[in-house]
């Protein structure tokens, strides 16, 4: 988690600097809803999210998420933690909740965790 916070922090700092410069059917009544973590559905395509990452995260985390001035974020696997870090920032990373719409925050979190590629 510390590495994720560091990576997301670096990405936020860079972004702040850039701103300044076919399955089976089931009965829905008997099927429990999936956890919130798995219900995030981005409105962007994978290519659009890759561009969003390049514009907002790659400056600190590198084009492949392997790090740079920010930490290596490859291998982060908690969608909720990544989303919270993007939204709230911390540890040197700026918060993006006021800069990116919730759908883009969700999409970036999915991209970072490898759920969207």
Image (spheres, grey):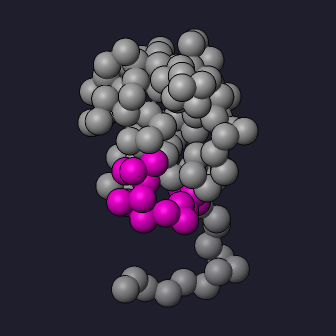
Q: Is residue 88 left or right of residue 63?
A: right
Q: Is residue 50 visible?
A: yes
Q: Look at the image and say whether residue 49 sits in the magenta stretch.
A: yes
On the image, the x and y values in percent for residue 105 come to 58, 46
Q: Give the residue displayed 61% in from the left and 56% down from the top.
A: 103
Bounds of the magenta segment: 38-52
Q: How many marks?
A: 0
The residue most toward the front is: 21
Q: Vertically, is 110 above or below 73?
A: below
Residue 112, compared with residue 92, is above or below; it is below
Q: Determine the image quadrant of residue 93.
A: top right
| Direction from residue 102 to residue 2 in the image, left or right | left
- Nearest to the observer: residue 23 or residue 3: 3
Question: To which quarter of the image does residue 100 belong?
Answer: top right
Residue 83 position within the rendered picture, expressed as x and y whole percent measured from the top left: 58, 38
Q: Is residue 7 left or right of residue 104?
A: left
Q: Is there any visible trace of residue 1 in the rendered image?
A: no
Say whether residue 88 is magenta: no
Q: Residue at x 48, y 37 (%)?
A: 56
Q: Residue at x 32, y 55 (%)?
A: 117
Where residue 15 appears, as percent x and y from the top left, is: 52, 29
Q: Position of residue 87 (x, y in %)?
A: 65, 35
Residue at 35% x, 60% y: name it. Answer: 47
Please tell me which residue lies in front, 26 or 104. Answer: 104
Residue 29 lies left or right of residue 26; in this view the side is right
């Amino acid at each position: 988690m510390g590495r994720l916070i560091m990576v997301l922090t670096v990405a936020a700092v860079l972004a702040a600097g850039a701103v300044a410069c076919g399955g089976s059917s089931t009965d829905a009544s008997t099927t429990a809803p999936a956890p919130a973590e798995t219900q995030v559905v981005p409105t962007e395509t994978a290519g659009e999210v890759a561009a969003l990452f390049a514009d907002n995260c790659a400056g600190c985390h590198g084009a492949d998420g392997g790090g740079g001035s920010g930490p290596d974020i490859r291998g982060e696997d908690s969608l909720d933690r990544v989303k919270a870090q993007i939204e709230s920032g911390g540890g040197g990373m700026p918060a993006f909740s006021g800069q990116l719409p919730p759908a883009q925050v969700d999409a970036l979190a999915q991209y970072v965790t490898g759920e969207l590629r």
